[in-house]
Image (spheres, grey):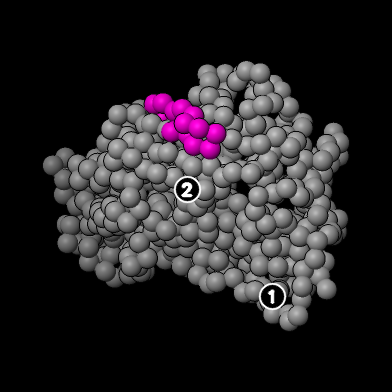
Amino acid sequence: MIKGKKRGFLLTFFIIIIFFTSTSCTNVTEQSNEKIKESQEENIVPVSGGTLSFSTLNPAHLIPLLNQEEENYYMMKLIFEPLITLDEKNTPQPALAESWTVQDNGNKILFHLRKNIFWHDGESFNAEDVKFTLDALKHKKVDSPYKSYVENIANYQVVDNFTIEVIFSKGKVGHLENFIFPILPAHRYEKVEEVVTAHKWDPIGTGPYRFEKYQRNKSIILKTNEKYWGKVPYIEKILIKIRNTPEEIIKSFESKDTDLLKAKDLDWDRFTEDKNFCIYSYVTQDDNFIALNHNNELFQDKNVRKAIQIAINRKKILKDIYLGQGEISDVPISPNSWLYNKEQKPFPFQPEKAKQLLERSGWKDSNHNEYVDKEFPTGKKEFSFDLIINKDNSIRIQEANKIQRYLKNIGIKVNIVSLSTEQIQQKMEGKDFDAILTGWSLSFVPDLSFAFHSNEIEQGKNFISYRNSKVDQLLLSTARTYEEKERKNQYNKLQDKIIQELPYIHLYFNKSAIIVNNRIKGPIHPTDYNIFNNIEQWYIKYK
């Protein structure tokens, strides 16, 4: 995605409006809370055949390791595969690696590869392909969004045709999520740097679909991989139509020229009443929050931060602005993730309690002017701060206006300041701000050090200058723990501490959706990691 795709942790400003309904189709549901409803039709037997079509913007190339385009990230997943994939809870699952052995307290992983897997040109897949891909990601000339995934790898070697050993840097452990990058066929390249220039328009992978044809500025055609190691998809052909603008992509779908559309920053109300379409939603990795500058004495009291948190009616904002399409969260971990602590319920809207917390911290309306104030060593100070927003983001403007009203209700004055993306970036880097209403698109490799660790204050992404030794320790523990149960336990402890501290005012995670022509049947389970998740079970023809 790569949305940095995903992405080292890439700060982004985004607008996502989607609308989901459970009335359009019998098999539509919210994936965050419910199991997908299977087709209610009886005695249907899917058969092979048919064409699924969707549109994309003109790709720069079809090299998966170099792809920076969100529109083509998902298409690549139909052709190429990683060692490890992610399920609907972002839990690592076997892909080209059928199993793995963790050694040396997580410092070494032996990946045991599947046998009898073939590249689309008929050559056998083996450990040399994995080594070649790692060589490419490590090469200085290969500018890949997946490069950060292999930063902690110190060494790797082929043990045998179907085993590769990966050793991590001293003091580091390997997490399976680091191995979700696509694997390339070594036999197609004479040297690693050719990855940048060769085979731009004739990709060969191991995935469920093989590349058939590319017509410049017109289309890309994929056909089923009949030698696929997994279940061969029912849908025989994928037709990807190339369009010049996002507007053309939408028009193609509305006119039923294509079958599938990924939701973006649009109002999907136009599709909810149309029985020709089904809408399938999912929770994304896109986290919205208010970043508080901890160098500002206003925000150094955690009771004050909690007062701000519970004074904002997040549920109402989601309903009014996002049409309910989001999941409230107090931590920067997607509520859809296996690492999210579902026993910790998000703070409710409690404006009266927020007032009490402010009063307990010495904030009172002594001037009787609607805003609270407090005596500091430098004199009396009114609780007033600037909230920076992106001037080109209409959603942020609406959110900021609501937040301004909610905080005024507890005696806090918010001055909305609209700046360009470049100006906001400068403010972040210079730590020259009170608060910023923004968001980031979180990596599928869960490591929150970038946002909270004190080592990240000067040169990293901890632009709020938050410092807490206990949080630093917990971040280190989560990074150094590899065993699943203990890793989950460490993340629960970290979330507990974040909720106690509230370094950021976390708001909610966005949802997105795919909108599909109802001629496409089957259990459709899109995820933020892969909207074509379980495409092998989709079908068009049946008897």
Q: Residue at 13%, 42% (x, y): give it.
A: 377
> Crowding at label 2, few (<14), some or many (≥20) Cα neighbours within 10 Å?
some
Picture coordinates of residue 120 (x, y %)?
73, 39
Which element is circle 2 on?
A: strand
Who is closer to the viewer here, 305 or 95? 95
> Crowding at label 1, few (<14), some or many (≥20) Cα neighbours within 10 Å?
some
Please state the extent of the stretch shown in magenta in the rendering.
152-165
Q: Which quadrant of the structure image shows residue 26?
A: bottom right
Picture coordinates of residue 59 (x, y %)?
73, 35
Horizontal side of residue 517 vs 490, given as left or right? right
Picture coordinates of residue 269 (x, y %)?
69, 66
Who is closer to the viewer here, 302 or 35? 35
Q: Name the residue under label 2.
A: 99
Q: Residue at 77%, 68% (x, y): give it.
A: 46
Q: Mark 1 points at which residue?
A: 39
Q: Is residue 161 magenta?
A: yes
Q: Which quadrant of the structure image shows residue 406?
A: bottom left
Residue 434 makes an appearance in the image: no
Q: Mark 2 belongs to which amino acid? A: Ser
